[in-house]
Image: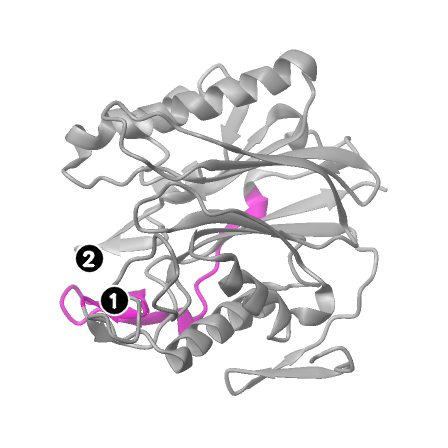
Amino acid sequence: MYKNVKVVALIGGVLWAQYAPAQQKVADAVFWNVENFFDPFPNTPHKDPAFTPQGVNHWSWSRFMAKRDGIAKTLIAMGRDELPVWVGLCEAGSRFVLTQLVGQTPLEPFDYRIVHREGPDERGVNVALLYRPDRFRLLLFSFLGITLPDNRPTREILYAKGVLDGLDTVHLFVNHWPSKWGGAKASLSRRMAAATRLRVSVDSIFALHPNANIMIMGDFNDTPSSKPIAFLCVESGLHNLSAPLARGGKGTIRYRGRWELIDQFMVSDNLLCADAPIFTSVAHFGIFSAPFLLIPDNKFLGYKPFRTYIGPRYQGGISDHLPVVLRIERNY
């Protein structure tokens, strides 16, 4: 649909500059919990029944398209030089919603490819990776299952390995750890199980490639100072680039008037080496908080993410999370 668009693209009533594909000195990685990004079809397996035309949320084709276009608009707005090379998503439903996102919006000229599968989550929310094949050559991917103490099904961890711009190999992990449903203490063991599964995979990569470029992104449902995150990072060769902003009171979700940074990026030692072919730094991590992603918080003052629903009441926003971005630079 958009193959012939060369100058501008119209989405959400706003004109956005179209970026011409080019070899760039930077590569952005984005992660975003897109909150219940479901198709509107009533017969989609393992989907929350509220998100159907007959369900309590009266989820319709027009509401789906508004959310789809809002996600695309945000990814385009985040492009400081060009669009992200990698987009990690969680709470993505069927593959259909992702093919719509990359094929029926102004994202289409960038030919994003999709890594996704229907996982075991009871509500049908999954992790996914979108990537640009002109910049990233995918070598392999897999989905890592997590065994919880109570054996309840939960989201998988997506692992992908590929080469950026023909320069160096990158190992990526996309996460959506178990929530604090039932209370932070009662649910801690579930997030520790996810941290343990991820740590085993990271350690196995380091055992074969001590200088591996590892990039971990996700909604961890815990802050950088939490026990599961500390277990993952301490003495593992991983660095949490989100921690400084969290200590400064910044966040991606707002709960009872307080921001919490639970959407994070972690990288290996080698990705912090400024002399390596590709590298990043703490300063290259950020939270994208464009005004159209926020709404006034009338109860606690300030602003909060503009979500799609509050309970069953449709608001028309995109997500209850803000997206995070990490810039990767290259020396060649």
Secondary structure under tag 1 reads loop
93 lies left or right of 304: right
Q: Quadrant of residue 280?
A: top right
Q: Earlier in the sequence, mark 2 or mark 1?
A: 2
Circle 2: residue type: Gly
Q: Can the viewer see residue 34?
A: yes
Mark 2 and mark 1 residues within 8 Å of each other at the beta carbon: yes
Please state the horizontal and vertical placement of residue 139, each as a whole percent of the image.
73, 36
Asked whether 173 or 253 is in front, the reply is 173
Identify the disc placed on residue 19. none
How would you rate the neighbour count of disc 1 (Cα within 10 Å): few for under 14, some for 14-19, many for 20 or more?
Answer: few
Visual colour scheme: one colour
Q: Which mark is residue 257?
A: 2
Tell me the element at label 2.
Answer: loop
157 in magenta: no
The numbered dot on residue 302 is 1
Stretch of the chain drawn in magenta: 283-311
Question: Where, by quadrant of the figure, is residue 60 drawn?
Answer: bottom left
Nearer to the camera, 215 or 329: 215
Q: Point out residue 238 in the picture as x, y percentages from the top left corner.
A: 53, 25
Q: Is residue 237 visible?
A: no
Question: Does residue 275 sit above or below 329 in this rendering?
Answer: above
Q: Amino acid at mark 1?
A: Gly
Say which residue appears at 67% left-offset and 53% top-offset: 85
